Amino acid sequence: MTGWDGDTDVAGLLQEAAGLAAAIIDGASSGPVTRPLPGDLLDALRAERAPAVGRPIAEVLARVRDEVVPYPMGNGHPRFLAWVNPPPHPIGVAGALLAAALNPSVAGGRHAAVHIEHAVVRWFLDLLGWHASSAAGQAFGLFVSGGSAATTTALAAARHRAYQRAGHDDRTAGMTGAGRPVVFATTEAHSCLTKAVELLGIGSAQIERIACDPAHRMDPPDLAAKLAAAASAGRLPVAVVASAGTVNTGAVDPLDDIASICRDHSVWLHVDGAYGGPAILLLHRFTDDRAALARADSIALDPHKWLYTPVDAGLILFRDGDTARSTFSLVPSYLAAEHTDDEPPWFAEYGSEQTRPFRALKLWMQLQHLGLDSYRNLISHDLGTANALRTTVEHAPDFELLASGLSVVCFRHHPAGLSEHDLDTHNRNLAKRLQHGGHAFLAATTVDGRAALRACIVDPRTEPSDIDAVLTAIRDLGPPGPQPR
Ligand SMILES: *Cc1c(COP(=O)(O)O)cnc(C)c1O
């Protein structure tokens, strides 16, 4: 019954699972946004040892239904407005199932999954106008686990190019021979940049922080000055990392000015589009930003953010794929024989993963079904909902807008008569209290030193009525009383 024998009713099993998945998706909008695991269930899970003897499939599915499904993170709910965690598009969920059933390794080869991934990547290169081959080499892209992996992959390539140009081979010798490496970014850059720089051995103390304007965007003159100072100090500039939608306030850096400065200083420009990339690539109103984005050397995208693809799906795009290949390519002898001339480039030669999941199928199916136009509508809807929240907050006497860009709105509850200190305490506790009540889920953040509530709308099912419900829930919690621990 529990063995891997011909007795398993595969279709029955998958139908049961599919029914459960449908119930999860259909039921996600009702009830509280999230719900903690009850203490006895948590204790039982913590005490449980790996079973020596298996149990029937029906019992396993029942445990998922009773012990896992009722206690979600909450990001399927339209009043979950924290972080950048959208609900999965249902056809992407189907894609995840089918990809798991096929279970290829998309390292390379000539099977369908390889061609599907190349196709999806090409569609994104097309949006950037990167389809044409250029003297510098052809553009290339590949799926990775997310924005963090995309950033690490991009910076590894940037580092390799910097050392190569300085006449050193970082792949074999490590980071020796050239000046101390330096990466340029603002304090608004996502924390994954710090992790990547630490992981790559550059060290986060080598991140030179560029000043921001009042809208939290990189200040180009400060970037130019710091690049010049680094050059005269004999340092090795590895990359400038700009943002097309910062995670905290949704700010889009002045990409065109930054690209010109990077060109003048011959330094790699990486743009983090993990959050805002889809809006900029797809919407007509961002045509100028899109043209500037296309001047980058590498771009991180995150389909599992604003393209509603089930986790995981990150995407890294290189304007010159040859640099990525010379950074990562290492074909072991037992695989060399597999490579033939008439097959497309092997993804495994352009990144750190060897066995690679079929991430592209989810997004390929979503794009097939929705088309770019429906995607434009979904993202526009999110922007419109964020705009409604922004406008409401701006006009309400007891709320205050602190920062906003793309579909991010940072604001605070501002009941009359509270000091700055008490406002901070009150707003810092609000996110927790809201979440506890199950009415809404907002992130807590800090904007210009002030405690803020952060909403990020990446759910086209979030409606103005949800926005009103969230603001009402905040008001109902009232001015600060005794704070929960
Ligand atoms: C989410 C995010 C990242 C990190 O991506 P992961 O998929 O979480 O690894 C990087 N940058 C921005 C702007 C993001 O929103």
Image (spheres, rainbow, N blue to C red):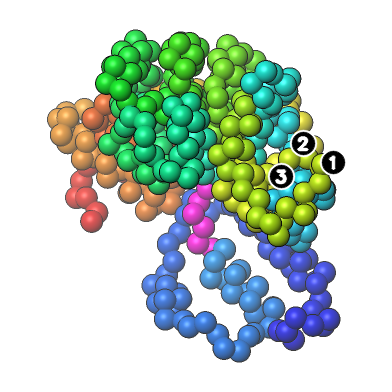
Specify the segment rendered in magenta: 70-78
Asked whether the beta carbons under mark 2 and mark 3 sit within 8 Å of each other, the answer is: no
Q: Residues within 10 Å of mark 3 (few under 14, many from 20)?
A: many
Which residue is found at the position 42% from the left and 76% from the top? 46
Disc on res. 342: 1
Which residue is found at the position 74% from the left and 57% from the top? 104
Question: Dot 1: what SS?
Answer: loop
Q: Residues within 10 Å of mark 1 (few under 14, many from 20)?
A: few
Circle 1: residue type: Asp
Residue 294: quadrant of the picture: top right
Residue 460 lies, in percent from the top left, at 61, 35
Circle 3: residue type: Trp
Residue 431 located left or right of residue 134: left
Q: CA distance from mark 1 to mark 2?
A: 17 Å
Which residue is found at the position 77% from the left and 36% from the top? 119
Q: Earlier in the sequence, mark 1 or mark 2?
A: 2
Tag in front: 2 or 3: 3
Q: Is residue 77 magenta?
A: yes
Circle 2: residue type: Ala
Nearer to me, 477 or 321 = 321
Q: CA distance from mark 3 to mark 1?
A: 12 Å
Residue 311 located left or right of residue 246: right
Q: Which corner quadrant holds the C terminus?
A: bottom left
Disc on res. 119: 2
Q: Which residue is mark 3?
A: 346
Q: Which corner quadrant holds the N terminus?
A: bottom right
Residue 418 lies, in percent from the top left, at 17, 31
Q: Earlier in the sequence, mark 2 or mark 3?
A: 2
Residue 156 lies, in percent from the top left, at 49, 38
**Image vertical order of residue 44 relative to residue 311, above or below:** below
